[in-house]
Amino acid sequence: ENGGKQTLIVSFVGDSSTAQVDLQKSKNEVVADGNDSATMTATVRDAKGNLLNDVKVTFNVNSAAAKLSQTEVNSHDGSATATLTSLKNGDYTVTASVSSGSQANQQLNFIGDQSTAALTFSVPSGDITVTNTAPLHMT
């Protein structure tokens, strides 16, 4: 009424009730040595594609042989991460889920550490009789 100006700052936030999660992995194969790891990154968006902050993302893995660095993380700039390690070879599935019911999965393959692989032969003591032999070359 008096011709004055007023500044109003408005912040728009996404609708977390429509949250959708997408899960990506940093690599497909991981060495099962307890040190090598894969980073799992969950991206959380609303139904309109807006990145969502402060949405709880729950990470799970389908085996107790694999370890996640954290199982519950609040998204920041639409992203939440956890790392996965294991000491046991095998295929593992990681699931990221949010409270809206959306979930996403990624499978990773943990493999043996070739740099520490060893092959041991045991030969019984005493005489060994060999017949019908063929040469065997080992390196």
Image (cartoon, rainbow, N blue to C red):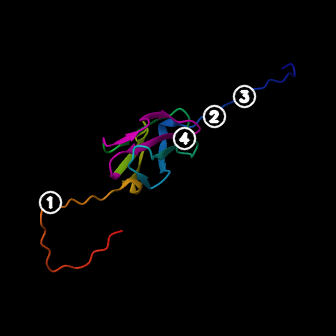
Q: CA distance from mark 4 to mark 2?
A: 18 Å
Mark 1 residue element: loop
Mark number displayed over residue 125: 1
Q: Of discs 1 and 2, which sits in the foreground?
A: 1
Q: CA distance from mark 1 to mark 3?
A: 87 Å
Upstream in the sequence, badge 1 or badge 2?
Answer: 2
Q: Which residue is mark 3?
A: 9
Mark number displayed over residue 79: 4
Q: CA distance from mark 4 to mark 1?
A: 62 Å
Q: Which residue is mark 2?
A: 12
Q: Name the residue: 47% across, 34% down.
A: 73
Residue 60 pos. (x, y %)? 37, 41
Q: CA distance from mark 3 to mark 4?
A: 25 Å
Q: Amino acid at mark 3?
A: Ile
Label 2 Cα neighbours within 10 Å, binned few <14 / some 14-19 / many ≥20: few
Q: Of discs 1 and 3, which sits in the foreground?
A: 1
* Pick the front one: 46 or 79: 79
- For this orientation, the residue located farthest to the right is 3
Q: Name the residue: 39% across, 57% down.
A: 114
Task: Please report the bounds of the magenta region as a residue range.
Answer: 64-91
